[in-house]
Image (cartoon, rainbow, N blue to C red):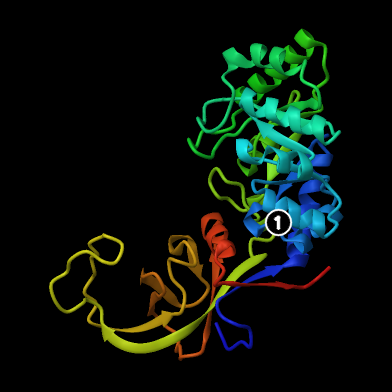
């Protein structure tokens, strides 16, 4: 907490700490003959941050938005760019033009990628995503053989590898068994079709526990990391990763009202602005502060205040705090830690300024 000349609200990204986290993870995975893919969607493909990741030794940059890939390419980020969301049929030409590799599950899309790759005299590489239980995107295991038979004759397409997604939509843990099954599928494909799969992408930051505990990682040689880099945590239990910074990113916002008020509203309580019926604990008169940021700007549930305050509610444009110990005045700045959801929403909001500090 304190006064600041910085515009409010602001996301403060400490580039030196992000670089440290990325470098530490690169070295850790490299020692076990694995590579990491730096996922930049949560920072909207910021080229300065992407260059910090590549300087730390990250070879692959993955993002789910073509616009972010274009932004990084325009600013001369040196990486292999991976579109990590299955392409839209309507923008396959853009995918071939700007992504070196794309994740795919649909044969009709891959055929369109092939057509456009031929027209652009390029070879577009694909990673086939396999359904392993999380029930987001993925080819059913019973369909893999037929899928590859249909892909191999296509011109302008190269199967670079396979991957899976876990601990996302369905929250399914990436266990040793799941990773062995993915490795077995890779070996089956290589033996059946006499091709070499270079990338076996086992998952995301949720795979960190598995990576630490399991000695035999079979064919898994690539993990996609976003939250681990930017927030220093694994994503199964949100435990801090030893040696990484958990405060590389913070939200700072300004107090626009500070007063003493009743803790319970006066009158008949009905639905709030979001269709919910709020409840309040009667604490009598309390010290309250209001911040000039709300649900339109950030997932308020993902914020942890770094001051002696409690979040007691929010609206579209305001967060209401209970002041527990400190004296907080209008114009003071309150700093927050963010979880991934809060970071994603705040970075996407055009009303939250993004500031990079401690350049490398």
Q: Is residue 163 above or below residue 317?
A: above
Is residue 126 at least partly visible in the picture?
A: no
- Residue that protrudes farthest toward the top in the picture: 192
Residue 199 lies in quadrant = top right
| Residue 349 position within the rendered picture, expressed as x and y whole percent measured from the top left | 54, 65
Dividing the picture into quarters, in which one does residue 333 lie? bottom right
Which residue corresponds to the image point at 83% horizontal and 40% vertical from the top-left?
A: 30
Side of 101 relative to 42 (left or right): right
Instruction: Identify whether 69 is placed above or below 17.
Output: above
Q: Residue furthest front?
A: 119
In depth, the one of 92 and 321 nearer the eye is: 92
- For the C terminus, the image quarter is bottom right
Label 1 Cα crowd, 10 Å radius (few <14 / some 14-19 / many 20+):
many
Q: Quadrant of the N terminus?
A: bottom right
Numbered disc total: 1
Splitting the image into 4 quarters, where does residue 243 fall? bottom right
Q: Position of residue 356 (x, y in %)?
A: 72, 71
Residue 223 x/y as whole percent: 71, 38
> Residue 158 in the image: x percent, y percent?
80, 26
Which residue carries the number 1 mark? 45
Residue positioned most to the left: 268
Asked if residue 315 can be seen in this view, the reply is: yes
Q: Which residue is pictured at 55% across the width and 50% down the height?
A: 238
Secondary structure of residue under mark 1: loop
Q: Residue at x 23, y 70 (%)?
A: 281
- 145 or 36: nearer the viewer: 145
């Amino acid at each position: 907490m304190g006064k600041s000349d910085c515009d409010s609200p602001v996301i403060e990204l400490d580039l030196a700490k992000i670089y440290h986290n990325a470098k530490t993870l690169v070295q850790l995975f490299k020692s076990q003959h694995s590579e990491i893919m730096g996922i930049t969607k949560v920072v909207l493909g910021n080229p300065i941050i992407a260059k910090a990741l590549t300087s730390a030794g990250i070879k692959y940059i993955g993002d789910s938005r073509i616009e972010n890939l274009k932004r990084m390419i325009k600013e001369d980020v040196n990486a292999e760019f991976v579109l990590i969301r299955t392409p839209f049929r309507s923008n396959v030409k853009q995918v071939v033009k700007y992504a070196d590799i794309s994740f795919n599950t649909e044969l009709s899309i891959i055929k369109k990628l092939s057509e456009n790759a031929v027209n652009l005299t390029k070879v577009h590489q694909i990673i086939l995503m396999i359904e392993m239980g999380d029930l987001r995107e993925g080819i059913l295991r019973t369909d893999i053989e037929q899928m590859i038979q249909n892909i191999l004759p296509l011109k302008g397409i190269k199967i670079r590898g396979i991957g899976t997604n876990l601990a996302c939509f369905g929250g399914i843990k990436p266990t040793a068994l799941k990773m062995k099954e993915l490795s077995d599928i890779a070996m089956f494909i290589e033996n059946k079709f006499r091709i070499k799969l270079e990338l076996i992408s086992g998952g995301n930051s949720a795979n960190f526990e598995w990576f630490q505990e399991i000695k035999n990682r079979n064919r898994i040689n690539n993990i996609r990391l976003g939250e681990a880099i930017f927030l220093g945590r694994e994503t199964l239990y949100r435990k801090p990763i030893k040696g990484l910074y958990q405060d590389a990113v913070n939200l700072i916002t300004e107090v626009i009202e500070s007063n003493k008020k009743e803790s319970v509203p006066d009158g008949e309580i009905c639905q709030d602005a979001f269709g919910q019926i709020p409840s309040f604990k009667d604490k009598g008169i309390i010290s309250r502060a209001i911040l000039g940021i709300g649900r339109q700007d950030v997932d308020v549930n993902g914020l942890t205040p770094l001051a002696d305050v409690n979040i007691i509610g929010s609206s579209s444009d305001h967060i209401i705090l209970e002041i527990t110990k400190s004296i907080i005045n209008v114009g003071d700045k309150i700093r927050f830690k963010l979880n991934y959801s809060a970071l994603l929403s705040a970075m996407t909001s055009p009303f939250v300024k993004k500031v990079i500090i401690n350049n490398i």
